[in-house]
Amino acid sequence: MIINLLALIVVLGVLVFLHEGGHFLAARAVGAKVSVFSLGFGRRLFGFRRRETDYRVSLIPLGGYVRIEGLGPDESDVAGAEASSEELLSRWRRAVILISGPLANVVGAIGFIALAFMVGVPVPAWQDDPPVVGWVDPASPAATAGILAGDLVLELDGQRLETWRELQLATLSRPERATEMRIRREGQELVVEMTPEADARYGLGHAGLAPPLPADVPRVAAGSAAAAAGITAGDRIVAIDGEPVTHFFDLVRLVSSRPGQPTTVTVLRDGEPLDLTATPRSEAGVGRLGIPAPNPTVMKRLGPFRAVREAAVECRLMTRETLRVLRRMVTGQASMRQMSGPIEIARFSGEAARTGIDAFIWLMGIISLQLAIFNLLPVPVLDGGHLAILGVETAMRRDLSFRTKERILTVGFWLIIALIAVVLFNDVLKNLPPSVLRFIPGVGQ
């Protein structure tokens, strides 16, 4: 928990500084006076003054703000900062200042992800492969839809899919939604309808599809049938009772039909074939050896220019899927569980920090991008809300009164507070054990 908390402080501190720094630099560039640069809201705890700007750390550590003279009322007015009495800046200057915060986060996202690529990021070896189905979970929506191993997925709801990564992202964003999937099977194109299940924790879509994985043994469970037979990590399984095994799910298919039956497992060990006898354990009538699915990864390390290009592509993909999820949330087609608040961000940050510097930098990039997207939503208090008001004022050819803007901001502020409360509640639910969740109406199953 301490690591999680420290990681959260670093992540939020850096990204809020980046966001507010974008507003600050834009304000200076257009000649606006900045009276306050604050990390946090509310009462000033400590800081220093340089020229006309008070650089401070404030009591409520939920973001931050810059107080720019002539920008009009903003979140700082409803969160405890002193009001400005300066004459309003021209609309184009206000627009430049407002857009620069999210833009700084986009630049930061590309920068962090590019840096992670330059350091080296372990990625699934199959993520850029064509989305050929290697295995279908028998109890999954994909199996119900009639999808078979060997099918090539071409489209999902008209969205062209070139890689397994794109298929995963598209499926995750469509929980409990009837989806048309175009596949190619033995040279023929078919269209099937599938409704991905909603993941119990985050409400993300799950289809039950898996890519072809090598039949390598990453490890062997202690006390398992595989351990008793002498199968070891590093072996490659090539046959079961003489039937060839080309990928891991061939192994699953062949072993599952042999519960309690002595079975000849042919492995390659140090390049030499070796026959071992194993008796799969019966689990609900299904044979199991005790070998987990492998997750082969490759180290993706890129030079500076290619890293920036790849980072921009990643940000484009994530932005597209995020906007789709937000649209479905607004229309009631997606669950609010897909949003994460401080508790979950702290957990993700702690896990990334424990995994390595590359994972932590990558997470910083993801959160920076999500912060940019969130701030551009047309909700009062957020930058997107201010830009929407500017658009209305431009269309009207006059500014709304300070009092009117203040009221709009107050409504927006309390809407954001309500959203934070809902997200925090969801964060707590995500971290409760299933034995507790089943007693909560509407949550437990």
Image (cartoon, grey):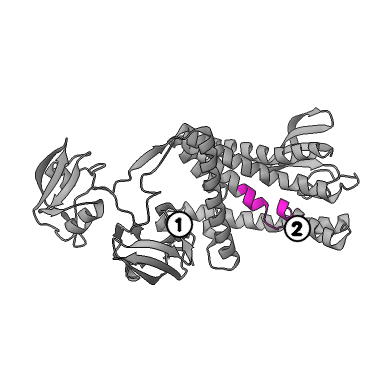
Q: Position of residue 4 (x, y in %)?
A: 51, 39
The answer to whether 5 is drawn above or below residue 92 in the figure is above
Residue drawn at point x = 43 percent, y = 52 percent? 165
Q: Residue furthest front?
A: 187
Q: Rounded to the nearest whole Å, what is the CA distance between mark 2 and mark 1?
A: 34 Å
The reply to whether the C-beta atoms of the residues labelled 2 and 1 are less than 8 Å apart is no
Q: Which residues are magenta?
A: 371-386
Which amino acid, mark 2?
Ala
Q: Position of residue 444 (x, y in %)?
A: 44, 63
Residue drawn at point x = 15 percent, y = 44 percent? 267
Q: Position of residue 370 (x, y in %)?
A: 59, 49
Q: Which residue is mark 1?
A: 201
Q: Position of residue 230 (x, y in %)?
A: 13, 41
Query: Which structural element holds mark 1?
Result: loop
> Which of the pair 201/72 is nearer the observer?
72
Q: Which residue is mark 2?
A: 388
On residue 116, which mark appears? none
Other residues around mark 1 within 10 Å, as few (<14) / some (14–19) / many (≥20): some
Query: Which structural element holds mark 2?
Result: helix
> Which of the pair 319/77 is nearer the observer?
319
Is 81 on the left or on the right of 415, as rendered?
A: right
Which amino acid, mark 1?
Arg
The answer to whether 121 is drawn above or below residue 331 in the figure is above
Q: Nearer the viewer, mark 2 or mark 1?
A: 2
Q: Is residue 330 magenta?
A: no
Other residues around mark 2 within 10 Å, as few (<14) / some (14–19) / many (≥20): some
The mark that comes first in sequence, 2 or 1, is 1
Q: Which image quadrant is residue 252 in?
A: bottom left
Q: Which image quadrant is residue 339 in?
A: bottom right
For the C terminus, the quadrant is bottom left
